[in-house]
């Protein structure tokens, strides 16, 4: 549960996607009042309040920060697209501008939130073929690491000196879609059910992952634990190769066949069919946090097979009219 002094309003900037909706549901179940700042309303209803913002300019939305217990910033254009120059520019700008305007807003209110939790990306480490990266590892080169560095630099410049700041370098979050238009796991499951869940590219690229429940628990810890500050890797402690990940997918779904997808086919299909970046499945990284276990955080889903079974199993039928769910049950449905 959230510590007593953090029961109150928590503002999620950029919270209308898969991860934001999952987090909002979890926080409400923990007893928090949740406000989602987004350019458009979430396409699912829930026990939160939606406030419009453009993620670039100050507006009346800034008043939601006044007296809030915490702000969690997830805002940024999806990277699930073809990396044209225009898209690359928008990917960086959307993250930097949203972070900057949050900092400006906090300087305009009388009681800014004492905690700022900032989303970042494990892509900041680049694509080392076999190295296992931790919080102390060197960052990589290329577009994705550039995005991560710009995002974090904007956060450090925007954060108030009095605010406790936590940066979560997040890996691939696996979870249920919940109708929020996210959840890449659902797409991989669809391919697997059609017999296309075989080796992708070389198959040895790192698949660092985290179950959505553990991701939400990390956000709660970042908000409520006064000693938590600085950069953390948000990823389960047992990363696997892409080959192992797809093998676990097939076993969970019960599909014995998994046709391989060589790199050339992935590049063609990603560009002409899925209209996305082929580097997303073809490259990867192995990341493991050193700080989280040292500070006592225990993952509920550290094993990929158990995580996939939890997320991909068919829901059990409702047997009682009176369903009083715990916060973790609410999060996982």
Image (cartoon, rainbow, N blue to C red):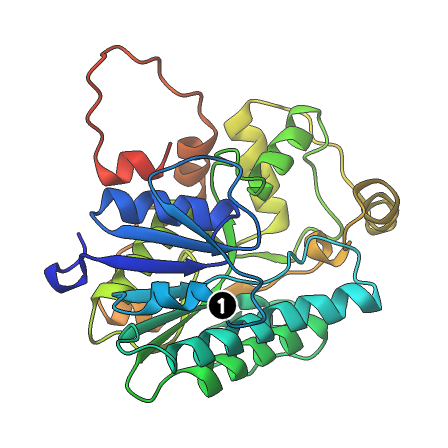
Q: Residue furthest front?
A: 60
Q: Residue furthest left?
A: 4
Of helix, strand and loop, which one carries label 1? Answer: loop
- Does residue 290 lie above or below 139 as drawn? above
Q: How far across and down, in percent of the image, does residue 78 sit?
A: 64, 56
Left or right of 123 on screen, residue 52: left
Residue beneath the point at 53% across and 84% down: 153
Q: Is residue 291 visible?
A: yes
- The C terminus sits in image quarter: top left
Asked where in the image residue 61 lies, by quadrant, the reply is bottom left
Residue beneath the point at 76% across and 38% down: 260
**Residue receiving disc 1:** 59
- Does residue 222 lie above or below 202 as drawn? below
Q: Nearer the viewer, residue 68 or 76?
A: 68
Residue beneath the point at 57% across and 49% down: 40
Q: How far across and down, in percent of the image, does residue 218 sit?
A: 32, 59
Q: Is residue 239 visible?
A: no
Q: Nearer the viewer, residue 74 or 133?
A: 74
Left or right of 23 on screen, residue 270: right
Q: How far across and down, in percent of the image, does residue 130 sit?
A: 60, 67
């Amino acid at each position: 549960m959230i510590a007593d002094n953090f029961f109150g309003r928590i503002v999620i900037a950029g919270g209308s996607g898969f991860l934001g909706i999952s987090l909002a549901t979890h926080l409400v179940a923990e007893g928090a009042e949740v406000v989602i700042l987004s350019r458009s309303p979430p396409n699912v209803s829930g026990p939160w309040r939606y406030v419009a913002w453009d993620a670039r300019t100050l507006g009346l939305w800034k008043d939601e920060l006044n007296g809030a217990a915490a702000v969690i910033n997830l805002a940024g254009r999806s990277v699930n697209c073809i990396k044209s120059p225009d898209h690359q520019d928008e990917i960086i700008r959307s993250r930097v501008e949203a972070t900057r305007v949050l900092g400006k807003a906090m300087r305009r209110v009388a009681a800014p939130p004492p905690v700022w939790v900032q989303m970042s990306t494990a892509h900041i480490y680049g694509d080392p073929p076999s190295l296992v990266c931790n919080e102390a590892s060197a960052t990589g080169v290329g577009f994705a690491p550039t995005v991560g560095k710009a995002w974090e630099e904007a956060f450090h410049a925007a954060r108030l000196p009095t605010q406790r700041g936590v940066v979560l370098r997040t890996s691939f979050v696996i979870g249920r879609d919940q109708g929020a238009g996210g959840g890449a796991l659902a797409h991989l499951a669809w391919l697997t059910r059609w017999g296309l869940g075989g080796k992708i590219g070389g198959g040895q690229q790192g698949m660092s992952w985290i179950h959505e429940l553990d991701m939400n628990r990390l956000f709660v810890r970042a908000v409520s634990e006064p000693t938590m500050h600085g950069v953390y890797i948000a990823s389960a402690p047992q990363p696997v190769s892409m080959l192992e990940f797809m093998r676990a997918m097939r076993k969970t779904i019960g599909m014995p066949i998994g046709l391989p997808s060589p790199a050339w086919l992935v590049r063609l299909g990603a560009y002409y069919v899925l209209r996305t970046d082929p580097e997303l499945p073809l490259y990867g990284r192995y990341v493991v946090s050193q700080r989280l276990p040292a500070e006592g955080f225990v993952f509920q889903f550290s094993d990929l097979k158990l995580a996939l079974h939890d997320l991909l199993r068919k829901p059990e039928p409702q047997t009682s009219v009176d369903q009083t769910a715990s916060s973790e049950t609410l999060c996982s449905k």
